[in-house]
Image (spheres, coloured by chain):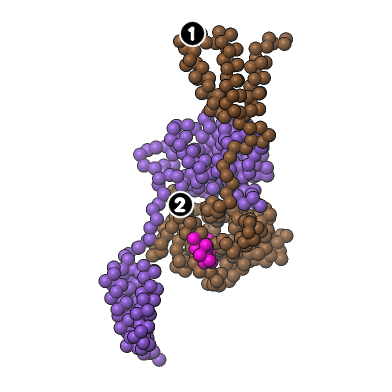
Chain colours: A brown, B purple
């Protein structure tokens, strides 16, 4: 998968997602989908409870739940324990929705991702650990992490679904990439009206309203004109919409046809 | 549900999540869980494909998938169409993972949430629309939105699971609240070592190394000392860990007991 120009291999340029003892194949598939949605492709599985065999992909619920993110699952690494799953990594983060009773530096998710981006730019290999669905990371595995990532959540309801936890992490990492689409207003085949077109419409409208006694006195006229202009400027009309509005007032002043 | 002090009603102070024609009850439940994980509680359902009856909550897969976020589902509003579901709202956003061919202002998710926060602070009622699982929002519904929110995704694999889309939106809104936990290093019953304790350990270590011929020449000694100090300072040792390390070197210089 190639997301950036210049021939860089995306997979070498991103954190590795490591699921410790995941329980449901379906959740592994949803993790894969969330990862690929946000450009991550390196997945490692540590001792999945229900086993793991890519040869069974046609019947395994992980591939169904991945909704097309097969490449992530096909290439996922399978490891018997955390030691082997992290052997080639330089820095490992554990994720948790709470502060833990261990002497570990804990970063909020957003600044953590900025730090990870810096580590990856410095050619470190970084892993992010997620615990099993029911319990989250156990203390022994947390003790093996260099630092922790705290995903900020509602303290009254903090237990995140596994795929949701991976989802927000992958999303935050994606937001740091420089390939985000620019904010814009889609224009299709039209363009914003210019001020001459806009004033042409407003003047015509006001003239037609004037001729029909809309402005009940000269005193209130400037205020009413200003209100009308304010209402029509707020929406940034397109050239096409100005033409439509001309048609609307032309039709309105016509007598009813029956 | 009360998340803030001062008696403010959280539900009046947050965007409404509106699911248009959701297909699977399970996804509705996962949406509810993701919402409550990040403090959102107002859910509205527009014509769910498989119907909706809270009286059936014991057998409905939505409640099972919500993993305890029952309050969100119990109170979810049910509407026949988008017009009625948005009647009391002042501003409605549609969500999409792509730019659309419609003249709509599109915001990236993060700045959109800042804008929504401002609207809610100005006592506007704001809704965020999510389309059905298979297709996303249809053009007719997009045309009813005031503006669009673009969730930035991998352009090569942009289709988000419904609950994952709600998840990142709710997460971004939660990150704007001022109740995020502070970053910190948990200390438990110990505390960071002070420099006297640290230097006491380093001096003892160096003395013991010196006595055992570790520093092979006076020329290289300062460099080796510096390397040792660099290695031990990086980890910000606690007072307890310093004591442990004293025990380690005490044990190491002891002859093997068998």
| Residue at the farthest front position | A196
In the picture of the structure, the residue carrying the numbered disc 2 is A152
Number of disc labels: 2
Determine the CA span between mark 2 and mark 1: 59 Å
Residue A149's place in the image compared with A79, above or below, is above
The residue under the point 28% across, 72% down is: B197
- Which label sits on residue A217? 1
The quarter in which the C terminus of chain A is drawn is top right
Residue A153's place in the image compared with A115, above or below, is above
Eye-nearest disc, 2 or 1: 1
Q: Is residue A116 magenta?
A: no
Earlier in the chain: of badge 2 and badge 1, it is 2
Does the rendering let one see residue A165? no
The residue under the point 64% across, 48% down is: B159
Q: Residues within 10 Å of mark 1 (few under 14, many from 20)?
A: few
- Which label sits on residue A182? none
Q: Is residue A128 magenta?
A: yes
């Amino acid at each position: 998968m190639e997301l950036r120009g210049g021939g860089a291999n995306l997979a070498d340029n991103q954190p590795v997602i490591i699921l410790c003892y995941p329980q449901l194949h379906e959740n592994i598939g949803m993790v894969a989908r969330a990862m690929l949605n946000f450009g991550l492709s390196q997945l490692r599985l540590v001792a999945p409870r229900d086993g793991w065999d890519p040869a069974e992909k046609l019947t395994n619920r992980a591939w169904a739940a991945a909704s097309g993110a097969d490449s992530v699952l096909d290439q996922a690494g399978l490891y018997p324990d955390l030691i082997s799953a992290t052997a080639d990594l330089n820095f490992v983060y554990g994720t948790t929705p709470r502060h833990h009773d261990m002497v570990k530096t804990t970063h909020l998710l957003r600044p953590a991702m900025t730090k990870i981006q810096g580590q990856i730019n410095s050619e470190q290999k970084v892993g992010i650990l997620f615990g099993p669905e029911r319990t989250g990371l156990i203390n022994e595995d947390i003790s093996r992490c260099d630092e922790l990532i705290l995903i900020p959540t509602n303290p009254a309801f903090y237990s995140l679904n596994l795929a949701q936890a991976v989802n927000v992490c992958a999303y935050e990492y994606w937001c740091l990439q420089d390939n985000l689409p620019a904010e814009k207003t889609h224009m299709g085949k039209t363009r914003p009206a210019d001020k001459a077109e806009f004033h042409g419409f407003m003047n015509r409208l006001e003239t037609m309203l004037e001729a029909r006694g809309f402005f009940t006195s000269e005193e209130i006229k400037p205020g009413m004109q200003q209100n009308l202009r304010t209402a029509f400027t707020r929406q940034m009309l397109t050239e096409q919409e100005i033409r439509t509005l001309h048609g609307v007032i032309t039709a309105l002043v016509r007598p009813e046809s029956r």
